[in-house]
Amino acid sequence: MSNRQLTLPIRYQISMLWKMGFKKKEIAEEVKFHPSTIGREIKRNSREDIYDPERAQKFANMRRKMPRTRRIIDDSLECFIEVSLQLGDTPEQMSAYLLSVEGIKLSAQSIYNWIKEPLKGREKWQKLLPRAKASRKAMNKKKTYINNKKGDSRVFIGDRLKVINNRRRIGDLEIDLIVGKNHKSFVLTICDRKTLYTMAAILPDQTADTVESKLLELLLPYKDKIHSITSDNGSEFSNWKSVSTKLGCKYYFCNPYHSWERGTIENTNGIIRRNYPKKTDFNLVDEKEFQFRIDLMNFRLRKRIGFKTPDELFHKRESIWKTMRKIAL
């Protein structure tokens, strides 16, 4: 059905059914086309709500004869794409910026095609594209969890407030720990559910005291904004009561082995892993460079928040992202 095209007899059938008062979805079922195809056809070829099948066929024939144009990516756009890739942007983010800020229509697929062209020098840009996740290997070291003692006062994600689940406010955070090479280096990651604003820090170990200390260091400056924290049940978060008290916020746990219940932080960790893949020894990573890459994440346009940047939404200020890309164009 996907390869079929509307013909003149089918258009006459659409016209007859439309005049009889059939709905677009009902017409689609009758002529065996997708409802959106019928909707576009009627909207495009109607005058004062009267669908004209002959006019529709005439313009369809004209469109088939028209040459398909392809936007040429000139030196200026090439420079923009190369700079954006180095800053960690995806082709979809580049396309959204060009349209919303510069008024240039260039689809994400066109950018992908340009990057993947088998030309000399393009290989280095292809490596900067988001890649598929590597297959997971079994880990020798088992993760330790908070003891489920009698009288446990943990509150689980099923009892979390609707305002948190619906991402209606700034300050509902998800946190996690990225483990480096041989379980000897660690990164604490924090992400705001509404704005996707990210904070992260390299840790010397994964003890509960170290994690608590770094959490408070990162979050106390934003104490007035923070409403809740959600984490997994790892023993590194066993000082959760102290964190909750000192920040004055609610603390929730996802169900054991249900990492998908914290999809925001899992996705954030995946973005960080593009620069620091599995088996990275974070003890050897320069902390200033690491923080620079986290800052870049917060200055990137994100599709889920309407192609705005986490930084401008979390801090409620003008986007630095646009200024950074302006230089390339």
Image (cartoon, helix red, strand yellow):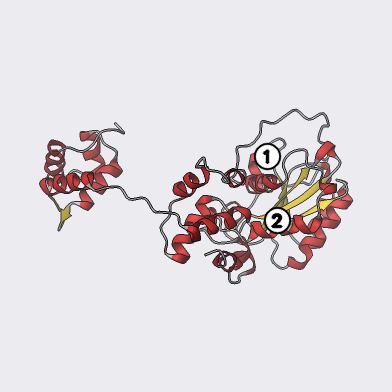
- Identify residue type, mark 1: Ser
Kindly identify which residue carries mark 2: 293
Check if mark 2's residue and mark 1's residue have beta carbons within 8 Å. no
The image position of residue 24, as x and y in percent, is 24, 44
CA neighbours of label 2 inside 10 A, class few (<14), some (14 to 19), many (20+):
some
- Identify residue type, mark 2: Arg
Q: Is residue 207 above or below residue 1?
A: below
Nearest the viewer among 273 and 108 is 108
Side of 123 relative to 40 (left or right): right
CA neighbours of label 1 inside 10 A, class few (<14), some (14 to 19), many (20+):
few
Nearest the viewer among 23 and 293 is 293
Let me know if residue 149 appears in the view. no
User: Residue 325 appears in which quarter of the rendering?
Assistant: bottom right
Residue drawn at x 52%, y 58% is 307
Let me know if residue 92 appears in the view. yes
The image position of residue 188, as x and y in percent, is 78, 50
Residue 207 is tagged as: none
Q: Secondary structure at mark 1?
A: helix
Kindly identify which residue carries mark 1: 259
Q: Is residue 19 above or below residue 301?
A: above
First in sequence: mark 2 or mark 1?
1
Name the quarter where the N terminus is drawn: top left
The image position of residue 224, as x and y in percent, is 72, 68
Residue drawn at x 57%, y 54% is 82
The image position of residue 46, as x and y in percent, is 17, 53
Side of 115 relative to 24 (left or right): right
